[in-house]
């Protein structure tokens, strides 16, 4: 066993890491021991094994759906397709969903699901058969239900799989008028919502913007100024990493110097073209051979290169005891779930690295999923009732301004483009982005208040857990526990 493997072997499991971080926070609280235990434990995990006839033989698959807390219902959480899926991982992710939903004030409990499968080994028709059978096994036990348990996409799944699951639920519940609300992250033509695909990456952008609005917080990381010109390394250019990198570079002036993928990494001091790299990965399956930048065979080494912001956006545990001492970024924002292990978290805190925690940083997905769920239950797209009325009211203002200019003969004119921008009422995408931005700002401020008001709260992760646990505890107390 080499040094790196030895260090990783000393790590607690993902589920244990979540509990250890939970314990750091509750040690600063005055919760009754029984309530503390009730919040910490996972309520139930359902394991399903089912067969599907593929390529002339029956293949058996194993899947999970875990409910961590039903202090609010329905419970919410993604379903991932990956070979690494196991009960420990699913329960850890379900726990994070509980705290995440509480932190950003979406009215859900925490859940998570997974199917042990490599989706790249199957064609689309085969994947549909597998997905529908998995959904069938969950639906008949109310583990997919608009009022009880609402999945969403996660690693290895997308709006395609959600459409299959929603259709499977509708076939099995033909009189449920709210059937489309049984899952979120669906395509637009299947009851989805504008902005859901980009939501988690957009949330990462909004989280960083809010952090950089507070010079005192930025100073704690050893940085200064705004996002403009900040050098960023992104680990994982999947849906989340791609959108975060794209928005930060195109809209905020950040420079994406490094990208880490499965087959290595890319580095370019002047910054990488995110759309170009993403298109290359889509066509070639990896970053190898990309014509710009330097290819590094062991891409994980790029996480240790000097940069201002490191964005782990793939899987858990990529920053661990083996590499934490070598991390040079001053700010880490956890776009993935659990990318920093408990041991690495302690090392980085002692080095003065600021970590924007996963339960906040990647909450954009569940936030916009909440909007989609509300849209499905209300059976009307956002903006449909008020958009034209809003435009008509704005037209009155513009007409009056133009009348006054004419009457006074002042020679003044409206700024170019002002009239078109002001008159255009908000569509669904703009409303979704507005709601997400508001959610990320308010959630950060609730964490920040804990971070700055209590001397013993030394980092944003503990602050996030404190806010979340307090809200879950209040919900249980309201139920009479």
Image (cartoon, grey):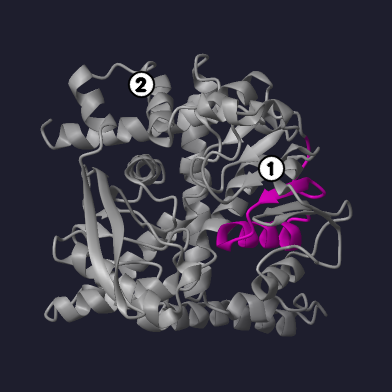
Residue beneath disc 2:
26
Image position of 182 with respect to 393: above or below: above
- In this figure, which residue is indicated by the disc labeled 1? 310
Mark 2 or mark 1, which is nearer to you? 1
Residue 287's quadrant in the figure? bottom right
Q: Is residue 326 above or below residue 132?
A: above
Seen in the picture, residue 379 relative to 466 is either above or below; the reply is below
Q: Residue at x 34, y 54 (%)?
A: 77
Magenta residues?
224-253
248 is higher (above) or lower (below) than 273: above
CB of mark 2 within 8 Å of CB of mark 1?
no
* Quadrant location of the N terminus in the rendered image: top right
Q: Nearer the viewer, residue 209 or 244?
A: 244
User: Does residue 249 show up magenta in the picture?
Assistant: yes
SS assignment at label 2: helix
Question: Where is residue 460 drawn, in percent x and y?
Answer: 53, 30
**The furthest residue to the front:** 56
- State which quarter of the image contains the C terminus: top left
Q: What residue is at 25 percent from the left and 46 percent from the top?
A: 67
What residue do we see at 32% from left, 80% from top? 56
Residue 154 seen in the current view: yes
């Amino acid at each position: 066993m080499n040094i790196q493997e030895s260090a990783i072997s000393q790590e607690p499991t993902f589920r244990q890491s979540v509990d250890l971080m939970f314990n750091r926070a509750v040690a600063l609280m005055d919760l009754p021991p029984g309530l503390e235990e009730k919040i910490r434990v996972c309520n139930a995990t359902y394991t399903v094994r089912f067969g599907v006839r593929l390529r002339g033989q029956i293949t058996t698959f194993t899947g999970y759906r875990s409910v961590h807390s039903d202090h609010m219902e329905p419970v919410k959480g993604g379903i991932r397709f990956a070979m690494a899926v196991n009960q420990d991982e699913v329960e850890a992710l379900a726990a994070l969903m509980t705290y995440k939903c509480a932190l950003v004030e979406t009215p859900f409990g925490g859940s998570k699901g997974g199917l042990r499968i490599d989706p790249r080994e199957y064609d689309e028709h085969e994947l549909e058969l597998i997905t529908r059978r998995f959904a069938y096994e969950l639906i008949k036990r109310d583990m997919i239900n608009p009022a009880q348990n609402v999945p969403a996409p996660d690693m290895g799944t997308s709006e395609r799989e959600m459409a299959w699951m929603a259709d499977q639920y509708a076939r099995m519940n033909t009189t449920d008028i709210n059937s489309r609300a049984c899952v979120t992250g669906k395509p637009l033509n299947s009851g989805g919502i504008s902005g859901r695909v980009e939501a988690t990456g957009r949330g990462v952008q909004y989280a960083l913007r809010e952090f950089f609005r507070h010079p005192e917080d930025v100073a704690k990381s050893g940085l200064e100024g705004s996002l403009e010109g900040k050098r960023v390394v992104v680990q994982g250019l999947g849906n989340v990493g791609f959108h975060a990198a794209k928005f930060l570079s195109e809209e905020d002036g950040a420079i994406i110097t490094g990208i880490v993928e499965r087959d290595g990494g890319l580095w370019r001091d002047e910054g990488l073209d995110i759309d170009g790299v993403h298109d290359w990965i889509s066509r070639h399956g990896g970053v190898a051979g990309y014509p710009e930048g330097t290819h590094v065979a062991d891409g994980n080494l790029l996480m240790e290169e000097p940069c201002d912001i490191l964005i782990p956006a793939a899987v858990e545990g990529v920053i661990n005891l083996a590499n934490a001492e070598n991390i040079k970024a001053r700010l880490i924002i956890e776009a993935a779930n659990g990318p920093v292990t408990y041991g690495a978290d302690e090392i980085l805190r002692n080095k003065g690295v600021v970590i924007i925690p996963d339960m906040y940083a990647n909450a954009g997905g569940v936030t916009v999923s909440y909007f989609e769920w509300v849209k499905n239950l209300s059976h009307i797209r956002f903006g449909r009732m008020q958009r034209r009325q809003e435009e008509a009211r704005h037209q009155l203002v513009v007409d009056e301004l133009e009348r006054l200019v004419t009457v006074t003969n002042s020679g003044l004119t409206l700024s170019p483009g002002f009239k078109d921008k002001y008159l255009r009422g908000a569509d669904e995408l703009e409303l979704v982005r507005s709601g997400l931005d508001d959610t990320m700002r308010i959630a950060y401020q609730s964490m920040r208040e804990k971070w700055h008001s209590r001397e013993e709260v030394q980092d944003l992760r503990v602050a996030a857990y404190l806010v979340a646990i307090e809200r879950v505890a209040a919900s249980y107390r309201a139920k009479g526990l």
